Image (tube, helix red, strand yellow):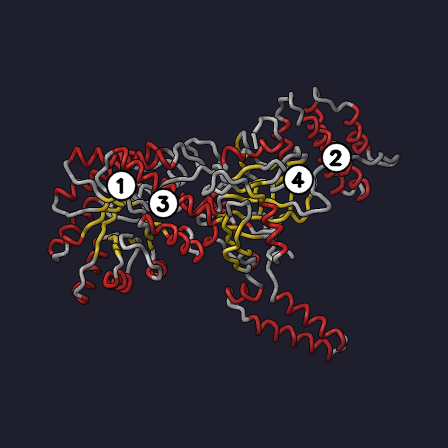
C-alpha cells in the first residue's frame, strides 16, 4: 500500500520501523510480508489470528514467524560474505547465536536448521546452555563458543565433546579458569580448543555502556592476559589457544563505536600473535543493534547503521589492522543475538475494556449545587481555541476545590458525581479542540495526563519484562481499523493487579509519546493490539507476577500464496502448572479446598447438593489458562 502523509495509519510510523516486514494493508489491517518471497502480498495478521482462533488457539499469544528468523540469519551471513568479497578479506565468517538471548527450543532448533549452510554455530554462557548446544547436530565447521564462569564439569564436557566432532571453544575469563582447564587436560589427556576473553578499554555509549570497557564483568585485563599466556605456555597448551574474544557491547547505537572497539580488539590480536600465540579466530562478541523506533539515529532504542554497514565496518577495520601488522586475516566471529531473533516474534492480545477520561455530555446543574459546580459548568460558555489554556486551568482548579470540599463534608456524593461528569465532558471538548491540525499549544502535553486507560489481556512482567525493567521500547500498534483516524489516546494497562503493569511510552512516526492513538472500542469485534520485535530476551526473562504464566505460543511459516503453515503450538501455562513453579502441589490445593467444603456441609453453611458445583468450579479454574478467557 502506498504510504501517504495524511493516511490515518501514518501516525504509527509503521513504514519507518517495519523493516519491510510489517505494513498496513488496503483494508486497514497490519499485514506481514514474507521477506523470502518479496513479490508475495502481505498476509493479514488479524486474518491469521482469526484462523488460529477457529483452531482453538486464542490471544494473548506469542506469535513467532519462522520466515523472519530465516531471513535475519541469511541477512547477517550474506552481508558478511559480501563485505569479505568486496574488501578482498582473506578470512571467512563463522557466526554463533548466543542461546541466552532466546533459549526456547523452537527458536534454537530453527536457528540451527537455517544456519547450517552458513556453518552458523551457538554460544553457550552456562552449563545448561552447553547441554542444549551439544544436543544439536551442527555443521562440521560451526563453532560452539563457551563463555561465562565455568567449573571443572563444564570444562570437562566441553573438551570431551571434541571427540565426537564438535568445535567447542573454551573461552577463558580469568587466569583461575586457565588453571582449571590445565587440570582437566591433565586428567583427560585430551587437548582443549581454547579462547581468551580480553577486556577492551573502549566503552560504548548508551543504555548498555557498562557491558563494555575495563569495568565490564567478564574478561581479562592486560596483566591477566599476559599471565594466562605464560601459564598456557608453561603447561604446553599455548598451541591450543586459537580464539581471541572481545565483547563490543550490547545494542551498540553508534557505528563509530563499533569501529573503535574492533580497532582496539585488533591491537590485542596482533600483539598476541607477536607473543607467539597461534590465533586463528577473532570473536567480536555481540552488539549489533535493532532499530526499534525506525529513527535511524544513535539513540537508546535505535541505531545509526544497517546490517550491511555493520559488517562492512568490521571487515574493513580488521583487514586494515591485520595488513598493517602483517598478520594473517583471522576467521571473524560475532555473537549477534538481538539482531537475529528480535524481529521474529510478536505479542498479540485483546483489549478487555477501557476507562475513559472524558464524556460526551455533562448533566445539568441543580439548584442546591455548590457554586463551584456551576462555575465548572460555566466553562462551556467560553471554551474556545483562543482560551484553551485558561479553560484547562479553570477546570482543574474548580474540580480540585470541589474534591477538597467533599473530603471536608461540604459537598455530597451526588454533587461530586455531577461535577465529575461535567469535568469529563469538558475534557472531551478540550481534547477535540487541542487536536485541531492548525493548533500549536502546550495543552496537548497536559491532556496526556487524562489519556484513557485500555485494559489489556496480558502480563507486562511475564511477556514484556524489559519494558517494565529498563524502559525498552517496542513498536505497539492496533492490528485493525488503521484506515480510520484514531479518535482516542490511551495508555495500556495489563491484567495484573500492579500499578507498574502499564505501558506509557509509545513509538509514533513523530517520536516517542506518553500515549497511544487508539480507536473507540468496537462493540461487535475484539480490538487487538500487537507488540513487535519481542524475540530477544523477553521470553526467558519474564516472571510469574500475580502467577500469570506463559501465553500460548505459536510458530508459523508464511507461504508464497498468501497463506501460512502452523509449524508448532505450545499451549500457555495452566494455573496448575504455575502453582507447581512456586512450590504448591495442585493436588494438595484441591484436597485442602475439598476439606473446607466438606466442613462447611457438616456445619450446615453449605448444602450438600452444592458440593459438586463448587468442586467443579475449583477444578476447572486450576486446570485453566492463567489469562482472561
Of the pair 80 and 607, the residue shown nearer to us: 80
Who's the residue at 31% across and 41% down the image? 248
Q: Earlier in the sequence, mark 3 or mark 1?
A: 1
In the image, residue 435 above or below residue 47: above
- Looking at the image, residue 485 lies above or below residue 120: above
Residue located beneath label 3 in the image: 336
Q: Earlier in the sequence, mark 4 or mark 1?
A: 1
| Residue holding disc 2 | 423
Q: Which residue is mark 4?
A: 452
In the image, taking residue 525 as reference, residue 491 lies left or right, namely left
Disc 3 vs disc 1: which is toward the camera?
3
> Which residue is the site of mark 1?
200
Point out the tag, 2 or 3, that comes first from the N-terminus: 3
> Mark 3 falls on what kind of element?
loop
Q: Crowding near pointer 3: few (<14 within 10 Å), some, many (20+)?
A: many
Q: Residue at x 43, y 33 (%)?
A: 299
Residue closest to the far front: 561
- Residue 603 image offset from top left, x and y in percent: 74, 78
Image location (x, y in percent) of residue 11: 58, 31
Amino acid at each position: 500500500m502506498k504510504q501517504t502523509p495524511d493516511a490515518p495509519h501514518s501516525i504509527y510510523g509503521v513504514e519507518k520501523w517495519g523493516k519491510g516486514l510489517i505494513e498496513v494493508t488496503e483494508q486497514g489491517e497490519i499485514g506481514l510480508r514474507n521477506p523470502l518471497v518479496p513479490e508475495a502480498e502481505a498476509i493479514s495478521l488479524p486474518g491469521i489470528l482469526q484462523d488460529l482462533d477457529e483452531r482453538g488457539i486464542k490471544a494473548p499469544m506469542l506469535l513467532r514467524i519462522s520466515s523472519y528468523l530465516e531471513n535475519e540469519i541469511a541477512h547477517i551471513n550474506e552481508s558478511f560474505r559480501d563485505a569479505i568479497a568486496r574488501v578482498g578479506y582473506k578470512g571467512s565468517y563463522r557466526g554463533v547465536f548466543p542461546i541466552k538471548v532466546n533459549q526456547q527450543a523452537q527458536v534454537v532448533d530453527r536457528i540451527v536448521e537455517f544456519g547450517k549452510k552458513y556453518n552458523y554455530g551457538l554460544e553457550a554462557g552456562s552449563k545448561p546452555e552447553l547441554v542444549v548446544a551439544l544436543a544439536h547436530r551442527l555443521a562440521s565447521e560451526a563453532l560452539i563458543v563457551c563463555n561465562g564462569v565455568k567449573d571443572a564439569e563444564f570444562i570437562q564436557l566441553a573438551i570431551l565433546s571434541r571427540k565426537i566432532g564438535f568445535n567447542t571453544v573454551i573461552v577463558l575469563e580469568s587466569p583461575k579458569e586457565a588453571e582449571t582447564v590445565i587440570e582437566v587436560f591433565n586428567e583427560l589427556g585430551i587437548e582443549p580448543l581454547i579462547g581468551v576473553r580480553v577486556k577492551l578499554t573502549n566503552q560504548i555509549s548508551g543504555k548498555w555502556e557498562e557491558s563494555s570497557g575495563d569495568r565490564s564483568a567478564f574478561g581479562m585485563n592486560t596483566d591477566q592476559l599476559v599471565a594466562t599466556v605464560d601459564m598456557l605456555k608453561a603447561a604446553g597448551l599455548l598451541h591450543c589457544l586459537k580464539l581471541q574474544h572481545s565483547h563490543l557491547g550490547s545494542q551498540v547505537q553508534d557505528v563509530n563505536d563499533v569501529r573503535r572497539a574492533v580497532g582496539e580488539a585488533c591491537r590485542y590480536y596482533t600483539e598476541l600473535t607477536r607473543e607467539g600465540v597461534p590465533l586463528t579466530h577473532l570473536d567480536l562478541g555481540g552488539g549489533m543493534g535493532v532499530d526499534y523506533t525506525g529513527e535511524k539515529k544513535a539513540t537508546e532504542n535505535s541505531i545509526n547503521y544497517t546490517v550491511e554497514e555493520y559488517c562492512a565496518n568490521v571487515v574493513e577495520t580488521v583487514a586494515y589492522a591485520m595488513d598493517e601488522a602483517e598478520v594473517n586475516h583471522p576467521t571473524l566471529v560475532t555473537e549477534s543475538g538481538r539482531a537475529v531473533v528480535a524481529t521474529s516474534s510478536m505479542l498479540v492480545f485483546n483489549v478487555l475494556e477501557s476507562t475513559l477520561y472524558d464524556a460526551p455530555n455533562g448533566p445539568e446543574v441543580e439548584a442546591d449545587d455548590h457554586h463551584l459546580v456551576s462555575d465548572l459548568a460555566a466553562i462551556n460558555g467560553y471554551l474556545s481555541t483562543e482560551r484553551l489554556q485558561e479553560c484547562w486551568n479553570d477546570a482543574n482548579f474548580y474540580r480540585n476545590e470541589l474534591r477538597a470540599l467533599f473530603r471536608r463534608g461540604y459537598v455530597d456524593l451526588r454533587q461530586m458525581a455531577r461535577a465529575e461528569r461535567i469535568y469529563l465532558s469538558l475534557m472531551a471538548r478540550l481534547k477535540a479542540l487541542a487536536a485541531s491540525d492548525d493548533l500549536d499549544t502546550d495543552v496537548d502535553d497536559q491532556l496526556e495526563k487524562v489519556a484513557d486507560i485500555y485494559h489489556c489481556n496480558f502480563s507486562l512482567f511475564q511477556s514484556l519484562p524489559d519494558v517494565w525493567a529498563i524502559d525498552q521500547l517496542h513498536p505497539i500498534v492496533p492490528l485493525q481499523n488503521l484506515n480510520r483516524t484514531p479518535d482516542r489516546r490511551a495508555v495500556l494497562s495489563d491484567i495484573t493487579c500492579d500499578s507498574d503493569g502499564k505501558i506509557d511510552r509509545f513509538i509514533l512516526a513523530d517520536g516517542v509519546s506518553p500515549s497511544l492513538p487508539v480507536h473507540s472500542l468496537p462493540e461487535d469485534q475484539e480490538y487487538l493490539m500487537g507488540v513487535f520485535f519481542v524475540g530477544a530476551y523477553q521470553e526467558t526473562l519474564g516472571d510469574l507476577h500475580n502467577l500469570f504464566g506463559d501465553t500460548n505460543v505459536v510458530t508459523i511459516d508464511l507461504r508464497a500464496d498468501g497463506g501460512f503453515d502452523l509449524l508448532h503450538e505450545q499451549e500457555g501455562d495452566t494455573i496448575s502448572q504455575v502453582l507447581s513453579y512456586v512450590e504448591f502441589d495442585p493436588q494438595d490445593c484441591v484436597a485442602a479446598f475439598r476439606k473446607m467444603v466438606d466442613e462447611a456441609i457438616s456445619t450446615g453453611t453449605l448444602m450438600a447438593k452444592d458440593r459438586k458445583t463448587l468442586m467443579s468450579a475449583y477444578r476447572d479454574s486450576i486446570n485453566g489458562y492463567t489469562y482472561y478467557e
